[in-house]
Amino acid sequence: MIEFRLPSLGADMDEGKLLQWLVKPGDKVKKGEVVCVVDTAKAALDVECWNDGIVHALLVEPGTTIPVGTLLAVLREPGEAPAAVDARLAQLTAEGPKPAATAPVAAPVAAAAVTQPAAAGRRRVSPAARKRAAELGIDIDRVAPGADGTVSLEDVERAARAAPAPAPGAAPAAAPVAPAARAAQMRKVIAAAMARSKREIPHYYLAEDVPLAAATQWLARRNAERSVTERLLLAPLLLKAVASALRRYPEFNGYWRDGAFEPGAGIHIGVAISLRAGGLVTPALHDVDRVDVDAVNRALLDLTRRARAGSLKLAELTDATITVTSLGDQGVASVWGVIFPPQVAIVGFGRVVERPWVVDGAVRPMPIVTATLSADHRASDGHRGALLLAAIRDRLQAPDELVKGNE
């Protein structure tokens, strides 16, 4: 029997609200297939199944708020008898709930495949669209999808505007969740996680000014040959530099759990993305060291779009092994991040500015970005942190070597 429980996003999630089941008893599901939608303080998320199996029973009704670790459903393994599952389920019910797990046990999703097709016979609908349709009392199955075949939040809003007014005496639709209320709740959750981080993690901080002449010139040459929609951003190059440096200094890539450092299964960089209604999320770009810069660029743009549309997957918020934050577009010179537990480091980048710089004995203007590191002293020390920042700096001086995948 396979137990399907509500997983945790980490330090800042202790409960979620089940919005919708996308499967029913008797359905066959594959590993990675989206089976339900759960609302958290940060977003409505598609939740994937971590095993192949057959849905035996759904144990939680939509609309129910449940703590992390709650048994949502049970699945039969291929060839398993229903009677055996019933007996085991009765035993679980008698034993009571298990402690919550901090994260689901799942293989990482490749960064180049951040969007999965819907299972055959099921329409692709973003979590935000499902939630908004429920709030407005609209049958999501009657909403026409967009050009890509996915029903988006905009499609639901369009259907709502076209819908006739309700008849007199009809029950009103559920009141929508105000964006300000969600933002306030998200801020509380983030504050609790950061307070825990500062209380429990012995932070140390380092900074390095990184010359970007080689990187910006390389970008200008590459982008001169591309259309506007295909141009590369600087951010993917910075992410590649971080990922490459982490291969040499892996003690910054992983988690502090049970009094010991646990290395990450891959280099999955959590990217801090601000949301239009307030707050932020840090979904992961997976295996950044193993894909080329164009793939990182596409994945980053897609991740940002879906984060702000409320259509992230739970897996994208569970397995970041380090976080990178950049506030350069906000005009700040540098940013000193707070580590997101159980991670052990966060790298920050400020804005690119021109400064006087000595090159071969002569002073010349140089584009500079300040890279910062906040790290956990239990997992590393300042000497190793300085080497990590130096490695990031050095890799950005040779972009032709840096941009390749499979390093």
Image (cartoon, grey):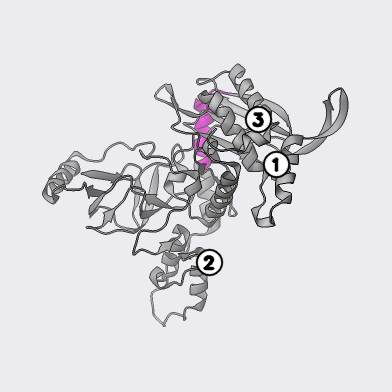
Label 3 belongs to which residue?
395
Which residue corresponds to the image point at 22% horizontal and 40% vertical from the top-left?
96
- Residue 203, given in percent of the width and then of the height, sits at 57, 24
Using the image as rendered, state which of residue 324 and residue 244 is in the foreground: 244
Residue 332 seen from this side: no
State whether residue 42 is above or below residue 212: below
Mark 3 vs mark 1, foreground winner is 3
Q: How far is disc 1 from disc 2 in space, using C-alphas?
A: 30 Å
State whether residue 223 is above or below residue 101: below
**Residue bounds of the magenta highlight:** 190-203
> Is residue 200 on the magenta stretch?
yes
Q: Earlier in the sequence, mark 3 or mark 2?
A: 2
- Residue 337, given in percent of the width and then of the height, sits at 61, 33
Which residue corresponds to the image point at 63% horizontal and 34% vertical from the top-left?
402
> Is residue 303 on the magenta stretch?
no
Label 2 belongs to which residue?
154
| Quadrant in the rendering for residue 51 | top left
Disc 2 secondary structure class:
helix
Disc 3 secondary structure class:
helix
Label 3 close to label 1 by CB (< 8 Å) = no
| Quadrant in the rendering for residue 390 | top right
Label 1 belongs to which residue?
328
State whether residue 90 is above or below residue 37: above
In-image side of 283 versus 297 (left or right): left
